[in-house]
Image (spheres, rainbow, N blue to C red):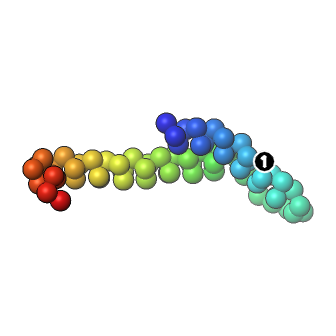
């Protein structure tokens, strides 16, 4: 949920910053919204993979062993 809120706040600001930066160049390749969407998708995938890895490792531990460590 925090990632969605961060994306809603950050992506429009990133879009504006990119457009302002690129406006100073005489020739430029058009950059669509897909680049920002792909960045958001990749960050969500990495977050999901890391969370899943740690959750599965925690579920493999016995409760007594988890309390000792």
Residue 31 percent location from the top left of the image: 72, 52
Residue situated in front as seen by the camera: 20 or 51: 51
Q: Secondary structure at mark 1?
A: helix
In this picture, is 3 found above or below 25? Answer: above
Seen in the image, is 6 located left or right of residue 25?
Answer: left
Seen in the image, is 65 located left or right of residue 50?
Answer: left
- Residue occupied by mark 1: 16
Residue situated in front as seen by the camera: 9 or 30: 9
- Counting labels gives 1
As drawn, the residue found furthest toward the front would be: 68
- The structure residue drawn at horizontal position 63% and vertical position 48%, both measured from the top left corner, is 36
Please identify the quadrant where the C terminus is shown: bottom left
Q: Quadrant of residue 23?
A: bottom right
- The structure residue drawn at horizontal position 59% and vertical position 43%, both measured from the top left corner, is 6
Residue 59 percent location from the top left of the image: 19, 46
Seen in the image, is 57 located left or right of residue 1?
Answer: left
Seen in the image, is 1 located left or right of residue 22?
Answer: left
Residue 18 percent location from the top left of the image: 76, 54
- The structure residue drawn at horizontal position 63% and vertical position 38%, both measured from the top left corner, is 8
- The structure residue drawn at horizontal position 66% and vertical position 45%, both measured from the top left corner, is 10
Residue 28 percent location from the top left of the image: 81, 60
Tell me the crowding category of disc 1: few under 14, some 14 to 19, or many 20 or more residues within 10 angstroms, Cα based.
few
Residue situated in front as seen by the camera: 52 or 42: 52
């Amino acid at each position: 949920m925090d990632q969605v809120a961060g994306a809603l706040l950050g992506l429009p600001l990133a879009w504006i910053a990119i457009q302002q930066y690129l406006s100073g160049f005489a020739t430029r390749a058009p950059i669509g919204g897909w680049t920002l969407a792909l960045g958001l998708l990749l960050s969500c995938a990495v977050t999901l993979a890391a969370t899943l890895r740690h959750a599965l490792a925690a579920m493999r531990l016995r409760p007594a062993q988890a309390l000792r460590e």
